Image (spheres, rainbow, N blue to C red):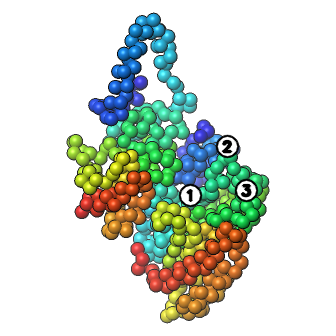
Amino acid sequence: MKEEDKPIKTGFSRRNFLQVSGTGVAGLAVAPLLGAQAAEQKNLERPFEVPNAVDIQLNINNETIKLKIDPRASLLDTLRYKLNMTGTKKGCDAGHCGACTIHINGERKLSCLTLAMRHQNDKITTIEGLAENGVLHPVQQAFVDNDAFQCGYCTSGQVMSAVACIKEGHTKSTEEIKEYMSGNICRCGAYPNIIKAVQAASK
Amino acid sequence: MNFFQYTEAKTARDAIKAKQEKEASYFIAGGSNLVDMMKEGIQHPQQLVDINTISGLRDIKNTGDTVYLGTLASNTAAAESEKIINFAPLVSQSLVKGATQQIRNMATIGGNLMQESRCPFFYDVSAACGRRTAGDVCPTVTAKDGIRTNALFGLNESCNTPHPSDMAVGMLALRSKVVLQSKKDTRKLALDKFYHIPVKENTKITHLQDDEMIVGVEIPLEHGFNHSAYLKVRDRKSYAFALISGAAALNIQTGTILNAGLASGWVGTIPWRFEEAENFLQGKAATESNFRQAAKIAISDAQPKKNNAFKVKLLEKILVRTLLMAKETPYGTNN
């Protein structure tokens, strides 16, 4: 991995933990063979080169990141697979579910329907950029306090959408919250508590 | 998704020039529809010409005689613009019923007008589809009893799926014009002359030429509309395409209709205007019985099959209700 491709977050995220522990187990079994096959292995580890890759620069959560991407890549795939920022979730990948909601220049948008290279002059905010100094954003805290999720898969999209919804001022009534949060589908059906969380955070 | 060339345009002229230089070249603005279709393998652009980089196409203006929307204004910007809410609220009323805030933040005015069908046969690349492949005949034409969502008007031998836009229906009732720029000049086309019924020989449903770009939409204020409403009936309450929608704009002076605009979504293969019903209402009192007669006129040439026959009665009731809602909603009271 090149310097510029390194994930910007350090420490253990859930995903990092799984990767690290997985390597550990595999490492035990493979260890005796390492000496004999080291040279061959090294050859196989040559990084896959993306055809027609483009160099781009993105501003994500107030950090400028330079990276090389497939020109067809969405912001969603770039975040998840190039930058290891897996907080933004991939649900339908077709603009139907809202799980991939992020903020672009302060407006909520669907990262799955974007081309990352078109957003080099934009300010991108993801769920990883909400908390400040280790303190949850009030909307995140309201989701915790109101038990506004079950499986949690849609939650980062719900939270990003809710932050924008409150900023837009579309929280005047339960009906308005329902309408303006309708782009975020929750298969667990945690809607009543999601609405409570949005109401609580909007006060 | 196939590989494509990508270029950013600085002016509309540059954009048109770049688009003409390559085969299968597409303008891209919000991208909410095009990127989706590219991912699904429905569209295979060889080149994308980014028009988001053109300045001056985002403005929403009131010139006194018209309200003008730049083609790159987002659907949210249009829906929440004071100028739209005060002088052409039907645009806002129809826009907020479409899609979701995330998509409205991405989608543009021009893109909304040009959006493609959401028909399942269009989206299934292994299915026959008259809109994806010129010359194909699809189940929306051949199914003996028709298809539940099929259009009632503008039927043809190629594609009978209804046009998906809400905004275009609102704009149609307001008799809006699309402003088209080519390399040489600019022309305006009334929205009902901009769209054409699908034909087998071509996958297009607009009169937009290859060397033209939509630069804006002009909503004339001369009709004096002072009441309007948009009613969208759908299978779920929010974030769904319509089963049928109604758009009504009325110029009512002391109980008399001086001018009426009446259109409907998801009943025509293109946004559908009811001109005869509009003419009937002109000069009549704004009463429920007149609205009922207008709706009867509107449905008189509907062409249902067994599976979408219910849409005729539904359309009639929706038109009456939309007109009643419009009567009760003077400009300045809805948003």
Residue plotted at (47% across, 70% down)? B92
Chain designation of label 1: B
**Image position of B211 with respect to A47: above or below:** below
- Of badges 3 and 1, nearer the viewer stands 3
Asked if the residue under mark 2 is in contact with the one under mark 3, i.e. CB atoms within 8 Å, the reply is no
**Which quarter of the image is occupied by the C terminus of chain B?**
bottom left
Q: Residue furthest top?
A: A36
Amino acid type of the residue that numbered disc 2 sits on in the rendered structure: Lys
Query: Chain for mark 2?
Result: B
Q: CA distance from mark 3 to mark 2?
A: 30 Å
Same-chain check, marks 1 and 2:
yes
- Does residue B114 appear in the picture of this structure? yes
Residue drawn at x 52%, y 34% as measured from the top left: A70
* CA gap, disc 1 and disc 2: 21 Å
Circle 2 residues within 10 Å: few <14, some 14–19, many ≥20:
some
Please check whether the numbered discs 3 and 2 fall on a single chain: yes
Residue under pointer 2: B22
Task: Tell which subunit mark 3 falls on.
Answer: B
Element under disc 2 = loop
Q: Tell me the SS state at disc 1.
A: helix
Write down the residue under mark 1: B111
Task: Please state which amino acid type lies under the numbered disc 3.
Answer: Cys
| Place of residue B269 in the rendered image (x, y in percent of width and height, measured from the top left) | 67, 66
Q: Compared to A23, does B29 lie above or below?
A: below
**3 or 2: tag closer to the N-terminus:** 2
User: Quick check: B154 above or below B106?
Assistant: below
Query: Which label sits on residue A34?
Result: none
Rendered location of residue B40, percent (x, y) = 59, 46
Of callouts 1 and 2, the N-terminal one:
2
Q: From the image, tell me which residue sits under label 3.
A: B138
